[in-house]
Image: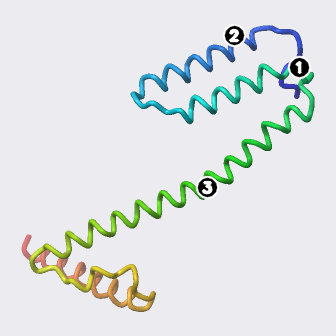
Amino acid sequence: MALYDGSGGDQHGQAARLVYGVFKVHRRSGRASHHLTFALATIIIWGVTGPLFGYSDTWQLLINTGTTIVTFLMVFLIQKTQNRDTQAIHLKLDELIRVTKGARNMMLDLEHMDDESLKRLRDIYERLGTQARSEDTENS
């Protein structure tokens, strides 16, 4: 299926409405994102150059290759961001454990335990949970 059949039609109007809608949502979000503006500008420039290149396979391959590369790189960026978030959450939880009276300080380094030690600890807490539920049932 060709991206543009040369007949004009309402395709240009639909594209303009789509771009306007994206910018409108972007403005409402209250965040200044130069990344979205850059991405939209790239797509608009690519679309506008379509007639210059006769909507050729190379012209289409350019955007496909570009988006594939960006997607590949974004996977690593997202992974790094999530790892950083996870570390921050661990530090916050460690601080809460550290300052909570009666908390077991051995819980501060759980992420460094081997799998077998974690399984034993999980079994202990599952037994404690079962015991607490049975005590609640008895008291009700």
Seen at 69% across and 30% down, the residue is: 42
Q: How is the image coloured?
A: rainbow
Picture quarter with the C terminus: bottom left
Up/down of 36 relative to 89, above or below: above
Residue identified by numbered label 2: 13
Do the CB atoms of the residues marked 3 and 1 lie less than 8 Å apart? no
Query: Residue 127 lies in what quarter of the image?
Result: bottom left
Residue identified by numbered label 1: 52
Residue identified by numbered label 3: 75
Compared across the picture, whether 42 is left or right of 138 comes to right
- Of residue 124 and residue 110, the one placed in the foreground of this image is 110
- Type of amino acid under label 3: Val
Do the CB atoms of the residues marked 2 and 1 lie less than 8 Å apart? no
Circle 2 SS class: helix
Circle 3 SS class: helix
**In whole angstroms, how far apart are the C-alphas of marks 3 and 2?**
34 Å
Mark 3 neighbour density, 10 Å: few (under 14) some (14–19) many (20 or more)? few
Seen at 33% across and 69% down, the residue is: 90
- Of residue 96 and residue 122, the one placed in the foreground of this image is 96
Query: Residue 28 lies in what quarter of the image?
Result: top left
Q: Position of residue 38 (x, y in %)?
A: 61, 31
